[in-house]
Image (cartoon, grey):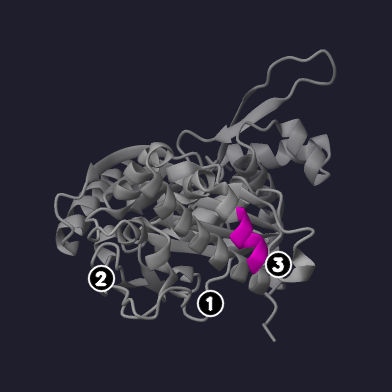
Amino acid sequence: MATPPDRTGPARATHLRWRGALAVLREMRREPGVTRAAVARRLGLSTGSATEITSRLRDLALLAETPAAATSRGRPTSVLTPHPDGPLVIAVDLRQEDWRCAIAPLDGQPRITDTAPHHSRAPEHVIAAVARAVRRLHHHYGHRIRATCVAIAATVQHGTVVQSSVLGWDAVDLTALAPDPRTPLLIGNDATLAGLAEARHGAAAAAATVLHLTVEVGIGGTLVIDGRPLHGATGAGGEFGHLPFGDPALRCPCGAHGCWDLTVDGRAIARHLGQPPPPDPRTYAEQILTRAPADPAARAAIARTATALAHGLAGLINALDPAVVTLGGLAPSLRAAAEPEFTTALTHGLMRFRRPHPPPVLAAALGRDAALRGAVATALDHVLTEEGLTAWAAQRPSPA
């Protein structure tokens, strides 16, 4: 049984000090532009308590207040926004073809600061380019940077990259992306972080149990329960693309045989068309999807790929029992291009009792920003804790 947190003596005082403050900051994060009156209503705070908490947070440079638009009823209120001198987090999105770096305040709204294609996928070249961008942000914002989170198309175990078949990497050290050793470096699989973002802020925001799948080069995803992705014993959970749903004769770049990855992306489409594996499976798949309406061979290849996607999805629904499924990357386009085949394969793959009321399968809402937004959310989860706020307050003590 887990040991309950210490809520006696100094620990209890710290907890009580930050409990209301964290609740207010989380509401500001959940709904950027929320008013103080709305937050007080949701949290059951009196006007006086809400005023006292927001005043303390202003003094600590954690939020700012601006007058809300006047209404015909009620007292004037204010809009809660991140303080212009408040904490920031860095998010890095390391994709197959490029990388992006962004910065975000406590409301979780990212601003892209740097982006570039991979001129070389050699890890030392990619990491050096990204590290320069991260160092610039540290140099400019100093102690305001409180955490960095990297979303990467790779298997992540114990917080480190152990393999990326997409980038052609084995174990890679990303510690160069943390130029200040006092600033935590968090690393997550891109599909897992995309699922986190969709479950909290995207297409499945109202659902308690969300299965997210993303097709890019192969397929990845996660199961999110109550806003938290399941990482498994070592953090490497969610590698759905390496379930043996494919042809056992095909060897995956991950080292296993028969991976589902090989049946749902541009490599599968090329194989069905009798063509060699494309160097960029995502772009290739997009090109064939464009051709499919007027090209029967392309349409047939897409249909076979969409069938494989739906067949595996049915298995995951049977096993994991999600309330909602979200599809990201190329998955919605594959489904739309072969809707009859997708629906038939999904229905046939479901257990009989599930067929009358299957979970809704929704297109992801956040597009290619999902992993980046998930990285921001993960970094802010680290900052918006009692420990995180205590550390911030130690650098900016409240006025006497």
Residue found 34% across the figure and 55% down from its top: 266
Real-space Cα distance between discs 2 and 3? 41 Å
- What type is the residue that disc 1 sits on? Gly
The image quadrant that residue 64 belongs to is: top right
User: Which residue is found at the position 23% from the left and 43% from the top?
Assistant: 116
Residue occupying image coordinates x 57% and y 37%: 63
- Which range of residues does the magenta coloring cover? 343-349
Q: Where is residue 273 in the image (x, y as percent from the top left)?
A: 31, 56
Task: Say which of 177 and 202 sits in front.
Answer: 202
Residue contact between numbered discs 2 and 1, judged by CB atoms under 8 Å: no
At label 3, which amino acid type do we have? Arg
Q: Can the viewer see residue 105 in this picture?
A: no
Quarter the C terminus occupies: top right
- Cβ–Cβ under 8 Å for marks 1 and 3: no
Percent across and percent down for residue 366 are 51, 42
The mark found on residue 172 in the picture is 2
Q: Name the residue under label 1.
A: 232
In the displayed structure, 145 sits above or below 71; it is: below
The residue under the point 65% across, 65% down is 348
Whole-number angstrom distance, CA of label 2 to CA of label 1: 21 Å
- The residue tagged 3 is 12
